[in-house]
Structures are given as structure tokens and as C-alpha cells.
Image: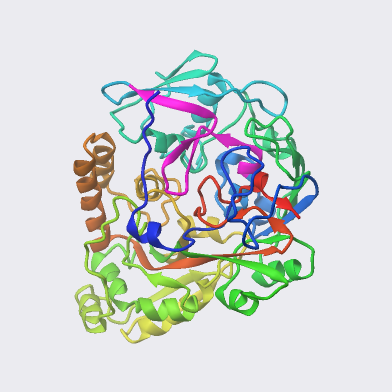
Amino acid sequence: MREYPGLRRRGFLAAASGVGALALVGCGGSDNDSGSGSGGGSDGKPRRGGRLRAAFAGGGASETLDPHLANLFADVARAKALFDKLADYGDDLSAEPRLASGWEPNAGLDRWKVTLRKAEFHDGKPVTAEDVLFSFRRIADPEKAFRAKASLEPIDLKASRAVDERTVEFVLKRPTAEFPNVLAAFGAYIVPDGSSDADFDKKPVGSGPFRFVSFAPGRSAVFRRNDAYWDGAPHLDELEFVVANEESARVNALLGGQVEYAHELNPTTARAHEGKSQIEIVRLRNSAMQAFAMKTDRPPFDDKRVREAFFLIADRQELIDGALSGAGVVGNDLFGKGYEYYADGLPQREQDLDRARSLLRKAGAEKLKVTLDTSAVAAGFTEAAGIFRDQAAKAGVTVEVKMGSKDSYWADILDSGTLCCYRSGAMPIESHISQRLLTDSTTNATKWHHKDFDALYQQAQSTKDDTERAAVFGRMQRRLYAEGGFLVWGFADWIIGTARGVKGVERKAPANTLDWARFDKVWLA
């Protein structure tokens, strides 16, 4: 069966040491340590047993285990422990088969047959083609705002069908050369046919490596090993997710032995503990996009001259040095530095306050006042907000920094406000566009609504020739560079802390990819 690998990263990430966010060893069920685990060197044969406690920032009392609503890193880590997707992104951001054993297109690339592997849900029922179609139709429900909806848009779900129990024929609305990326889309988890909204928080049933035990929104979730997992049973007996929104709380819990894994530490913490004997610091270079998101559908950012002025106000290196303690590289107002299709030929933007003031005058915004929403929800956010406030003042712009709730920040900023701190883990550029920059994208934080841009995306999807497809993506990025709503000022290191006894931690896969938060492959020494 022919497989199409999807998007791949190039030079920048391939050459960087330890690029990406935390990942856990292996895609298969092997018991052999790869030698790239936490602590360095081979840790020998994995040990079975024990409970790993992992601390993440969470979403408060509104948290859910519905995998189609997964948005925060904590949501995704829990979802991938309980559920599977048909495919997921490998370390190089190519689509790798998961519940799908393979896929094959017709000559026109508008029909794809996907074959399922033999796998079972936690209740013992097999994963079937009908479960796949139910899951995708649920995600595509026009009354819902599920994350993967825009990514699944190319599929004609009414015409798609189950050929047999383990074969799905997907009929597409247009030729789609990189359809496997759709199968790997963020949030495209497979759930049992007939699952109701209420099922997910009471007793969710998935096909993932862990089974549900308990869930207290905003506090904790406990899962138990699934011995029948198709990819090999986890080494751990149990996995507990602990919500700790304050970075200091996650660090202190790790140092005090209350957890064994602390997600997302700040650079100052990393420097204080790196090379010490108490905990292990996993530093993964330049993996997280750092940005300010300007809402392009409302004043003052509905004027592209104001947006360009803000691009020119930013001193990116000062933001890297001050907000990230130098742990990152400058950005150029585009997502996906080093990924396939990235428009790396565009001039690197530099601060130009004279030009910024001139643009603001032309826009009638010489004494502009704007509120910048931020929160301590992510490393560097509050520091970046303060630095940018001072930079803007030099251009005659008054920026009022507004602190938001860590529990609701990500939901609040999607629709409210005009300017906010924003960040993203890794995904193919195509996925970033489909989920954040199309008119109907459910996480369109910049409110970028342009039908001609949507049409270009569809054109890129339908273009069979790689060079011609790259040219279309380049055209789209040049427009975003000129007048988009994301002021991408940097790409930050992603920093994780683990107890010394945690083994099997891989250091190559970015966040949002298959091997990130791969808790079924970790063990306790």
C-alpha cells in the first residue's frame, strides 16, 4: 500500500540539537531503551510498575476529557493517553500510521482508502470503520466548535463510506495531495460509534494505552495501564495528571517528590537546576512559536498600516533576551521556522520606530492606546508584555497590560480583546493555516477572515506538484508577512523537568507530535 509522508522539516530544525518539545521514547512496543532517555545513556530494560505523576498547567473547572475539545497541552496529553488517531505526526512532522495501518489514493487524489489495524476499545469492542466515520462526523458537526473541524473540511463525509469493518473510503471535495496530514490533525481522535457528550467525563472509552479511573476537572485525572493496547502495554501501572497552573508550584512539586514530571518550566528555573543532581532538565531548542496576536476584524488592527507599525515596533532580540533569558531565536512574523514550505527568503524584520510612527500617522493613530492581554499561563508571557509595552512607548503608543486568568486565558482571548500574548507548539504549516487562519477555523485568534486566502489554501491542497504547491504556500505567507495578525517575535526553547528516576524520555519530537507526552513508553527506575 502506497503511503504519502506529508510535511517534513528542513535544515533549521533538522540541524538543531534536541529540537522540539518533550517526547517519550518510541513508536512501537519494543522494550529496548533507545539510549536517548533522561539521565543519558542506556538505562537497561524498562521496569514495569508504579504510578507516574505529571504536573501540567490546566484549564480550571471547565476542563473536559472530550478529546475533540482538546486545546491545552494538558488536554492533549490526557487525550492521547486515552485515545488514538488514525495517524500522528512523527519527529519530522510527517504523518505516521497509528490506528490506520496504511492509506492509498486513487489516481486523482480525491478518494483515499484507509485500512485500520486490529485494535480494541477499552470495553473490548473492535475499532471499526463505522467508529471512524462517527468520530469525523461528530467533529464536523456545524453546531459544534471542535478543534479539528477545519482540518477535516476537505472530506465529503456524506459520501464517504465503510467498505468493510476495517476499511474506510474517504471521498474528498477536491484532490488533496497530503491527505494523511488530515488524518493526523490536531484533535482528530477516534471514539466509539454512538458516544455522547456526557460519556467523556463520566467514563470515557478510547483505544489508547491507558484506561480511565477518575477525573476531577481542574485538579487531577488518574488512568490505569491498558494491557490489551495494540501498540504494547505501558510500563507504568498508573498515570496521574496533576493540575498546577503556577510554574513555581510545578517546580516545587517536582523538587519535593510530589510529582515526577513537570511540564513547561521557565528558562530561569532551568538555569538554576541544570547539571544539578536533584532533577533532570530537558531543554529542547527553539520549538515554541512566541507571538502577539492582533485581531484584524476590529479597531485598531482592522487597519493593516497599524499592524505593520506593530511589526516594526518590536525589537525581537530584546524580547528573546528579556522574556526568554536568551533561550530562543528571533522570529519573522510567520509560523513554522525551518518547516517545509516556510518562506525563509523574506527579509528579517528589524525595529524601525520612525517608519512605525509614520504608518501610525497615516492611519490617524498617532496617540494610539491599546490593551495587551497576557497571563502567567505560559513562560515568558508577562515578561514579553512588559518589554513590548516599553518598546511601543518609544513609538508614541500606550500599551496597557492586562493580566488574565490562567484558568480561562486561552478561551478568553479567542474572541475578546484586540491584542494578546500567544504561543504554539509544532504542527505542519498546512495545519497551522487550516486551524488558525481560515474563515471557519475554530481557533482563529487573529480573526483573519479572507475568502481569497481560503481559496489559496484549497488550491495548495489540490496541487499535485510539490514545487507548484510550495509556490502557493509561499504566496500565502508573503501576504501574512505583509499584513497578517501574528507578530511572531521568536521561537523559544521548550523546557521540561523530570525526577532522576524517570527513564525513557526522548528529546527529539516537538510538542503536538506522536512521541511528545508519550507516557506509555516511560518507566520509573
Q: Choose between 289 and 284: the one closer to the eye.
A: 284
Which quadrant is the N terminus positioned in? top left
Relative to 167, is 353 above or below?
Answer: below
Give the quadrant of residue 94: top left
**Residue 426 image position (x, y, % from top left):** 45, 54
Res. 297 in view: no
Region of the chain picked out in magenta, as a range? 79-105
Residue at 31% over, 67% down: 332
Q: Choose between 524 and 314: the one closer to the eye.
A: 524
Residue found at the far bottom of this picture: 394
Residue 503 part of the magenta segment: no
**Residue 397 image position (x, y, % from top left):** 35, 81
Residue at 31% over, 21% down: 106
Residue at 55% over, 70% down: 379
Q: Choose between 388 and 81: the one closer to the eye.
A: 81
Relative to 373, is 163 above or below?
Answer: above
Count of labels in the image: 0
Residue 98 part of the magenta segment: yes
